[in-house]
Amino acid sequence: MVGGTFSGKDPSKVDRSAAYMARLTARTIVDAGLAAECEVGISYAIGKADPVAFEVDTLGTGEYADHILTAAARDVFVLRPARIIDVLNLRHPVTGISRSTGTRTR
């Protein structure tokens, strides 16, 4: 993440919405028992709705090869910024994030 990713609450900033989706993707992979650890990278180019790069890295803890998990995650999770905003309901104000669970509270 770069620049002002979390400096504002504007969900239309692709850095913010993509960071939320990357976190959801990584948590889902770990929660499903597909890896003990997971990092997800998403890169976008100005004017392009689809990411120019998407990668799942299980840091050697995956039950499957990273390229297989990357392909599966690309098929399962929405990666277009407008769809991420809709799916994660980011247009509505969030009052906080629980430090203990990392989940949003309203």
Image (tube, rainbow, N blue to C red):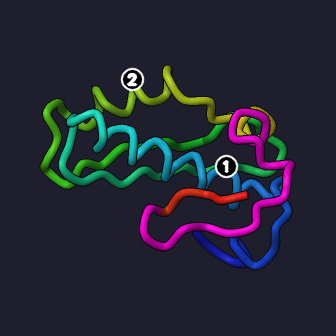
In magenta, the rendered stretch is 85-101
Which of the image's four quarters has the N terminus? bottom right
Q: Quadrant of residue 105?
A: bottom right
- Outermost residue, front side: 106
Q: How many discs appear? A: 2
Residue carrying label 1: 44
The quarter of the picture where residue 95 lies is: bottom right
User: Along the line of sight, which residue is nearer the eye, 100 or 61?
Assistant: 100
- Marks 2 and 1, the one that precedes in the sequence: 1
Percent coordinates x, y for residue 17 in the rendering? 70, 52
Residue 51 at x, y percent in the picture: 63, 40
Q: Secondary structure at mark 1?
A: loop
Q: Residue at x 70, y 60 (%)?
A: 16
Q: Which mark is residue 19?
A: none
Picture layout, residue 91 above or below residue 33: below
Rounded to the nearest angstrom, the CA distance separating label 2 from label 1 is 19 Å
Which disc, if any, is residue 72?
2
* Near-viewer residue (34 or 100): 100
Residue 4 sits above or below residue 32 on the image: below
Instruction: Name which residue lies at 28% across and 33% down.
Output: 32
Q: Magenta stretch: dominant SS?
A: loop
